[in-house]
Amino acid sequence: MQVEGFFEGLGHALGRAIRFVVDMLSGALGAVADAIDAFLQGLARAIGMDVSIFSLILLVIGLLFLYKGVRALLRRSIIGGLIWLLLGLVVMGWLIR
């Protein structure tokens, strides 16, 4: 009977330790998720766009187009740079209200 009580206590202690680790990780990951959400909400509010995965993907694509346009202009490729900048501005214009 003493052996069963020992293993029950050991299992209980191990279970509490696992529960503590899971609660700590859940809290930390929840805080990171809240920070990312607040960042995206602030970004969307400042730009004037909706917060959705589609809008965020279009934002990244538009910024990449603008980046490629600026790089093309720095390489003295005027026509290519203007085309990339125009495409970037069209995509960014769709997003901004």
Image: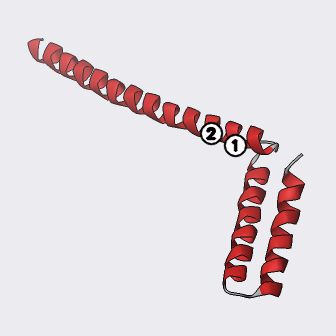
Disc 1, SS: helix
Task: Give the vertical position of 12 relative to 39 (above or below).
Answer: above
Where residue 5 appears, as percent x and y from the top left, is: 16, 13
Contact (Cβ within 8 Å) of mark 1 with mark 2? yes
Give the residue at mark 1. 43
The residue depicted at 51 percent of the width and 31 percent of the height is 30
Where residue 11 appears, as percent x and y from the top left, is: 24, 23
Residue 97 as seen in the image, left or right of residue 65: right
**Residue placed furthest toward the left:** 2
Task: Give the vertical position of 42 relative to 18 (above or below).
Answer: below
Give the residue at mark 2. 39
Disc 2, SS: helix
The residue depicted at 72 percent of the width and 81 percent of the height is 73
Quadrant of the image occupied by residue 57: bottom right
Where residue 56 appears, as percent x and y from the top left, is: 73, 52
The residue depicted at 43 percent of the width and 32 percent of the height is 28
